[in-house]
Image: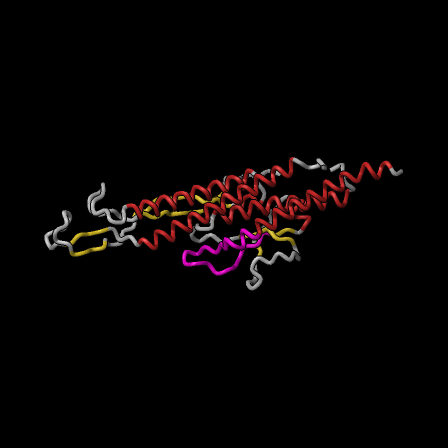
Amino acid sequence: MSFFDSLALSAGGLNVERARADVATANLTNANATRSADGGPYRRRDTVLESEPIGRAFGDRLQRALRGARVKSIATDNRPPREIFKPGHPDADAEGIVRLPNISTIEEMVNLMSAQRSYEANLEAMQVSREMAQRALRIGRTG
Amino acid sequence: MGLIPNPLSSVLEGILAYQDRRHDVISGNIANANTPGYRAFDLVLKGSMDQMQPLEARRSQAGHLSMDERLDRLGARVMRSEAPGRLDGNNVSMEQEFVKLMENRMRYNAAFELMDRWGSLMPLARETR
């Protein structure tokens, strides 16, 4: 009764959801940043996820079908920035237009909540793994 | 399993192996709940009442390679869910995976209970001879 596979899968899931939560939080924090390290307004970030085999080259058919989740990369959203007319702003251009990050607070909050819920589900799966493994160790012990 | 009369022992062993592996599959589905394009799958017993999505027909995965022989003997098959995916192609239903997670754990515990009780009956059987 080996639970290493399910623990590895759940751990990968936790990492993925943590990355999604981090990215959503960064987007929320920088939602009004008109200046960023690359010049220009902050650009929204997004996680790119993929599933990959968990590395059991010699396992049976079922083990080879198992897929873990991982963050492939953090992508930059290239949609055009939001423009508002505010001539007095320090970052206003010649026409008085200020370019702001094109971030929807609602969208980021929804992503954050989804990441949290999925994180908790992976935690639960991990706890069930542990419980099942411990149950196996208690076999034969009555009373 | 020397504790238990033979036919029952191999059935129980098979069921425990099935639940163990099914737990891996469910953990994998939960981990990939947000991976674009990922399709949920399950390990089902022939004729089992665990219909994942009763309204959708399920296709079994093609493949002539076997699984663990205990699972093969039980008639367990890997089934991929044909539920419609969301916008990104992912079709994992967190609610269903959770229900499966809980049910699987309860049945796993029940199988162990059964094994333990059989084990404690054996010395008693010997004494009554």
Q: Residue furthest left?
A: A94
Magenta region includes residue B124? no
Which residues are drawn in magenta?
Answer: B78-99
Quadrant hosting residue A140? top right
Task: Judge whether residue B87 can be spotted in this image.
Answer: yes
- Quadrant in which the N terminus of chain B appears: top right
Q: Position of residue B2 (x, y in %)?
A: 76, 36
- Quadrant in which the C terminus of chain B appears: top right
Q: Position of residue A142 (x, y in %)?
A: 72, 37
Quadrant hosting residue B120? top right
Coloring applied to the structure: secondary structure
**Residue drawn at (43%, 47%) of the image:** A116
Magenta region includes residue B95? yes
Q: Position of residue B6 (x, y in %)?
A: 77, 42
Task: Judge whether residue B62 can be spotted in this image.
Answer: no
Q: Residue furthest front?
A: A143
**Residue drawn at (24%, 49%) of the image:** A32
**Residue drawn at (55%, 47%) of the image:** B25
Question: Camera-side residue: A54 or A84?
Answer: A84
The answer to whether B91 is drawn above or below residue A61 in the figure is below
Q: Position of residue A45 (x, y in %)?
A: 31, 47
The answer to whether A123 is drawn above or below residue A81 in the figure is above
Quadrant hosting residue A58? top right
Q: Residue furthest right?
A: B129
**Residue drawn at (62%, 56%) of the image:** B50
Is B30 situated left or right of B22 in this image?
left
Is A107 situated left or right of A6 in this image?
left
Q: How many marks?
A: 0
